[in-house]
Each structure stands twice: as structure tokens, then as C-alpha cells.
Image (spheres, rainbow, N blue to C red):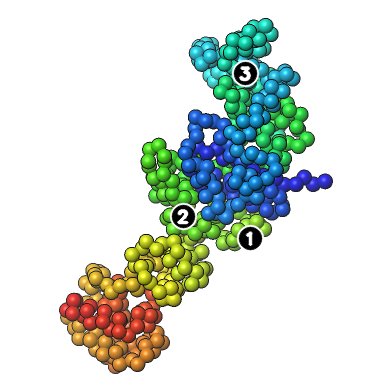
Amino acid sequence: MERRVRVRFAPSPTGALHMGGVRTALYNYLFAKKHGGDFLLRIEDTDQTRFVEGAESYIQEALKWCGIVPNEGQGYGGDLGPYKQSERKEQDLYRKYAEQLVTENKAYYAFDTPEELDKMREDLKKAGVAAPQYNSISRARMQNSISLSAEEVEKRMQAGEPYVIRIKMPRNEEIKFKDIIRGWVSVHTSNLDDKVLFKADGMPTYHLANIVDDHLMNISHVIRGEEWLPSAPLHIHLYEAFGWSDTMPEFAHLPLLLKPDGNGKLSKRDGDRLGFPVFPLEWKDPTSGEVSSGYREKGYFSSAFVNILAFLGWNPGTSQEIFSMDELVEAFSLERVGKAGSKYDPNKARWFNQQYLREKNNESLAEELLENHADIEELKGIDKTFLAEVCGMMKERATFLVDIPKEGDYFFAAPTEFDEKTTRKKWKEDSASLMTGWLTEFEAIAEPSSEIIETKFKLFLEKRELGIGRVLPLFRLLVTGKGMGPSMFQIAALLGKEETANRMKVGISTLG
Ligand code: GLU
């Protein structure tokens, strides 16, 4: 029988979720949905020293905003919980498994103090070992249940001496596994150390908790960032040591996200330094108070953000670029995820948002503006139908929704300034009388629709034997204060006869 697809996103709440983390969650989600499986959220918070206030709720909110919603896990229910490792630890679940390995001689107790560990590293360095490790060779000279007698171990335990449990990595074996993205990966155990599985503070390490939980939660595929690839051989070894090889998940390590110049990994620390956010939502660091911007607050649509992330490592193999979540589910496969690091391109990201903006209907844009950006001064007390018309005229020219009221401020109030360059180039001595002439014609229109205004405007040009470039920029300047914008005839029709005429009058007398 085919195994049910069950994948998990397993972040550690050590700060805001980086966009690379959201991409990992997204690929897991897409994979689960594609195969009719489950997508779990598990919070890996065993490292208490790295706990950050608010990080867990940030993760939850970010996933929700993106529509990457788990169907099981922390905050989503399920029979295999708790789904937060600190709560699982309370049941002494991890200790039991670590002890099992000790009993079977696959792990051991180690009592070494930090000073003893330092000394071991120093001694080995002096002896010419470039990267000293606690491993199958050095363990013999350390304070552990392999080097010490059973009585000595018992005595130390009775005395309450702190100890950890380390994996007993075999000396001369090859660990091999097939990564879905990278193909065969093979590592010799002589290059691996005896990692700590269980800490002196009673907490499991990431390695132990991760493997135990993936096993107990019936995880079928582990899809995670490339930074975890070096840990994978230890994880494979742990599955074997526990006797769980038959149900071991398949692994897929996703490519790194690189800075726009391709120079290194895009990291949390890049913050806004490179001119774009690295976090989905704004994040205020609780310790430093430092605020980092988020895609949501910058005005990205969550659908565009998801589309951007989908393409950072995956491609559909066709020229289609715009994908809804449902289309992504349909098209996604791990086979089409590349090995090479993926460069983040901020211009392309803006382009994606622009495409989504153009596709949305005017009414929903107006609604979204009124709901989420009510603080924008221009929007106070604005009629929704009027705003929808403005959105229709402006959306082709904008990248973000908030550009519409900002760049189209003249829809909401008469201009108080006139574009300097246009004024300098176009406003001549006879412009006032010329525009007064057009004003008279305009005011004579009984019901000015954009078509009628355009017809009358053209007649006016013919009568005076003038080119469009002589008069239209002046009309725009007087009514909007700008040198560019959408159709002037549509603008004038929307503003209405009285408002347009008033603005022209004020403009003519101001510019003289
Ligand atoms: N807790 C790990 C992290 O923070 C999870 C790694 C994994 O998916 O195995 O990324």
C-alpha cells in the first residue's frame, strides 16, 4: 500500500520567520496538497536559551497570511500531539528514547565538564588535528560510560553529577541516502562526531527530538532547507539505531536563497539593509526593539508573495509565471526543484505584485484599501464607488495598492502645487488665455462623459489649429498638478464638471 503523505514544517521559535522559512513551509504545503496528504506544524523549542517572545505567534500569523494553513499540529489539533516539543518533553518522552539507545549500547553517558572538553580540543589541535571532535577515537580518553567502569558511572550518577547522552557513532561505516533533490549522498562515519542527543538540563537536542517526533508523527517526507543537509547522515543513523529504517521518511533538501548579487545566503540579519524585507510580516525584535519591515506592511498581496516564493527554487517547466495557490498545488513537484541556490530579485518581486494588482477587480481593490489602509489621509470619508473608479484608472500605473491613493492624490483633493518641470516647459505667456478658452468650451458641455469631453477637446484643438501636445499637458497640470497620469478625459469626467472647472480657474489664476 502507498504510504500516506505526511509532511511537517518544524520551525524553532527563535525569532521572526525568514522568507526562506516561509518557502520551506510553502513547498511542504504544496507537496501535501498535491498528494492529498497532511501538512503539520510542529514547534521545535527544545533550545530554551534561544527562546524569543512572540516568535511562535508570529509564525502562526505569517502562515495564515500566506494561506499556508496546516491541517494538523500546534494550534490545529490532531491525535498525535502535543505538537510543541517543550510540552512533549514534560512527558519525559525523549529521555525514554535516549535511554533505550544507551541500553542497546548505541549511545552513552558523558560527564565531561566544559573545561575538559576545551582541553580535549586544545590537545588535539596541538597534535595536528585541524577540526577536533568528540568522536569514535577521542571518546576513549574522555569521561564517559564507555571509558569509565560501570561502578564509576553509577557512583557519578548517584552523586548527581551532570551528564549528557551522546550517540555512539560507528568508526568505519558508510552512511548513504537518496535525497529527492540532490540524488545519492554518501558520508563516511569517520567524518561524523558523537553528537549530544540529550542535554544535562533534561532537554533533548534538536537531532533526537526531531527524529523521535518525525517517527511518532508518521512523517513520510522531510522537506527542509539545505542548511540541514550536514545533519542528515546523523538522522539516517538514528533511524537505523532505533530500528525504524522501514518507516524512515524520504528527504528533500531545498536550495539556499541567495542575496540578489548571488553573493551568499540571504539571511535574517540582512533585514532591510538590501532595500527589501526579508520577513513576511513586520517584526519588532523584543530585545533590541529594532523593527524590520514585512512584505505585508510594504503592500504586497499575500498571493503575490506566495507566487514569488514558489519561484525561488522551483519552476513549472513552462513559461507561465502567475500561479494561484490552487494552480501551484496542481503544478508543483519536488523533481522540479533545483539544487543550485536561488537568487532573490527584488525587481521581479515588485513585478509579481504589479501583475496581481492589475488582475484584481476595481471594487475589491477599493474594499481592500478602505479595510486595511483606512489610516491614509486621502481615503478618509471617501465613497467606495468613486474609489473603485480611481483604482480602475490607476492600477495599470501602480506597483502596490497604496500607490493608488498616494500617486493619485489629486482624485481626492485639488492640487496645491504644480509640477515644476511641466510648468517650466509648457506654461507660456498665452497659456492663461488659451486655457480660459478651453474652460469656456468645457463648461458649456451639459453632461460631461469622458467621450464627450474628448470630442469637444478635439474640436477645440481643430478650431484653434493646435496640436494635442500643446494643450493636453496644460489641462492635466491645472486639474491634477502633475505631468503624467491616466486619461485626462476620464479624470475630468470622474471629478465632474464643477470640480474640474473650479480647479482650472484656480490653476489659471495661480500660474497667471
Ligand atoms: N527546527 C528546525 C528548524 O528550525 C527544523 C529542521 C527540520 O526541518 O528538520 O529549521
Q: Distance between the residues labelled 1 and 2?
A: 22 Å
- Tell which of 115 and 315 is nearer to you: 115
Q: Residue at x 57, y 40 (%)?
A: 11
Vertical position of residue 128 compared to residue 229: above or below: above
What residue would you read off at disc 1? 327
- Residue 148, position in %: x, y? 65, 8
**Disc 2, SS:** helix
How many C-alpha atoms fall within 10 Å of the one at disc 1: few (<14), some, or many (≥20)?
few
How many C-alpha atoms fall within 10 Å of the one at disc 3: few (<14), some, or many (≥20)?
many
Q: Distance between the residues labelled 3 and 1?
A: 48 Å
Q: Which amino acid does label 3 sit on?
A: Asn
**Disc 3, SS:** loop
Q: Which label's residue is closer to the chain start, 2 or 3?
A: 3
Q: Is mark 2 within 8 Å of ligand 1?
A: no
Q: Which label's residue is closer to the chain start, 3 or 1?
A: 3
**Nearer to us: label 2 or label 3:** 2
Vertical position of residue 268 compared to residue 306: above or below: above
**Disc 1, SS:** helix
- Tell which of 113 and 92 is nearer to you: 92
Q: Which residue is drawn at 20% across and 86% down?
A: 433
What residue would you read off at disc 2? 296
Vertical position of residue 364 compared to residue 240: above or below: below
Q: Quadrant of residue 132?
A: top right
Checking the image for residue 135, the label placed there is 3
Q: What residue type is labelled 1?
A: Glu
- Residue 119, position in %: x, y? 51, 12
